[in-house]
Amino acid sequence: MRELLQGIHDWMEEQEESFISDIRRLVEIPSVSVAGDEADPYGKECSRVLEVMRQLAWDNGFSGEILENRCLEICWGEGKKELGIWGHLDVVPEGKGWVYPPYACTFKDGFLIGRGVQDNKGPVVAVLYALKYLKEKGFMPGIRIRQILGCQEEAGMTDVDYYLSVRPAPDYSFVSDCSFPVCYGEKGIFTATLLTPSLSRRLSEFSGGMVRNAVPAKARARMDGIWYDGDGIAGHAAFPEGTKNALAVLCGVLLTVAPDREDAQVLKALLELCGDGYGRALGLPEGSTCNVGCARMQGQQLRLELDIRYPVDEKGERMLEKLRAFVGEKGFQILRYEDSKPNLFPPESGFVQTLMKAYRQITMDGRGAYIMGGGTYARKIPHAVGFGPGMEADMRILGLPEGHGGCHSADEAQSLKNLKRAVEIYAAAIIEVSRWLCEEM
């Protein structure tokens, strides 16, 4: 393997301009998944990004097939065993407060900035370039490799359900949508839509956030004809450290202005629910997170979108029990709820150990496999784990405001150096997994 990868660093240096250009072509498309129609099930922009990615695959030496404008399949190699490499081309809404254009893919001080450069368009292109390098070098994997790209990862993952209904699952899969090295477990995800008690006519507007799996950075309300703002720090719902929920900030502002008003109980309850990011007001188990990502007026009530991540040794039924106790006390209603059970893959398995071997051969990093709170396609695919490409990067050179730069934040940023390094790791992983699967036959 070492000989095969000997020139990959120099090769990536030569490919840098086209690498950035290919990522930019995807980032320029605002592919937020929405409810569409039969022709465009996730909206026209998602259909468009699938077509552009198919063209990128063609330009880089691979053919791809779009399946009902829900996903794209890029195949390479022949063999009885199959490796699936999954990613997604939809993004969360851009939100507000960007310093740089969200859909332009700015290159500055060694970083790419734009919605999707981290989550997940940049990693998708990194995988494609790993395949491209190996193909150009004449590597014959001895297995069939499928890069499978969906367009509803951020909004329900029905794209995976569809794909697995029309294609058999690969023997093993990894998802390029987390941090290196291997993520062998994901927390459970419990989501719910809540409705508060009625508010007085004095509160005529109240809104904040776009999606439940992102901590909102902005919220606004109009009380007694006066507008009030809540400014937070955005981030991913599963990683609340360093974030600040704008809805909680806004509730605090309104309670300071009118602490004794008739809506105070509802505002206090909402503040408790989203104030710390860990669900302490609900009494959630240690290691859980809790985010109110979106609030809107529905008549004179607030409709809230809730996201809870809970440990792999817990059950969704317990989250429901805790939530019911809270809303019963506060007079809220649960309109709907859904539980996505935790995903846990044996860390001692040959697949995990093979991926870890490839990672360590490139990085010489001794870190071990881990469990995370984020939710990826791995939770819905047989024999699947998460595998990069996130790596630590010091963004201070960019001078971004606090809370900017994260994957669900304003000015989402990705280190180009890290992304090129990921190409090397993915190429090593493809070689090692191919050999391991061939030995299994």
Image (cartoon, rainbow, N blue to C red):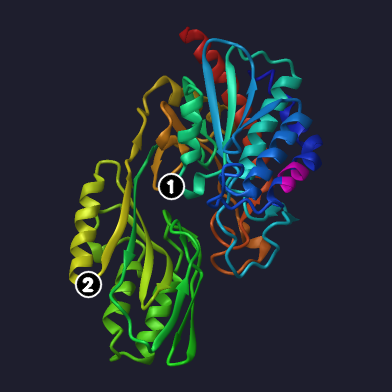
Q: Position of residue 86 (x, y in %)?
A: 54, 33
The answer to which quarter of the image holds residue 421 is top right
**Measured Cα–Cα span from mark 1 to mark 2:** 29 Å
Q: Secondary structure at mark 2?
A: helix
Image side of residue 395 versus residue 6, left or right: left
Q: Is residue 256 above or below residue 133?
A: below
Q: Nearer the viewer, mark 1 or mark 2?
A: 2
Which amino acid, by three-letter code, is at mark 1?
Gly
Which amino acid, by three-letter code, is at mark 2?
Lys
Q: Position of residue 1 (x, y in %)?
A: 63, 18
Residue 183 appears in the figure: no
Residue at image mark 2: 330
Give the mark nearer the N terminus: 1 vs 2. 2
Q: In front: 254, or 263? A: 263
Q: Is residue 316 above or below residue 439?
A: below
Q: Classify mark 2: residues with Cα within 10 Å, few (<14), some (14-19) or many (20+).
A: some
Q: Position of residue 165 (x, y in %)?
A: 46, 28
Residue range (magenta): 20-25
Q: Are marks 1 and 2 in contact (CB under 8 Å)?
A: no
Question: Is residue 80 found inside the magenta-colored segment of the image?
Answer: no
Q: In front: 203, or 281? A: 203
**Residue at figure coordinates x 65%, y 34% from the top left:** 423
Image side of residue 148 versus residue 256, left or right: right
Residue at image mark 1: 374
**Residue at figure coordinates x 69%, y 53% from the top left:** 111
Characterize the magenta stretch by its predominant secondary structure: helix
**Residue at figure coordinates x 72%, y 26% from the top left:** 132
Question: Looking at the rendered structure, which numbered label has been put on residue 154?
Answer: none
Q: Is residue 292 above or below residue 66?
A: below
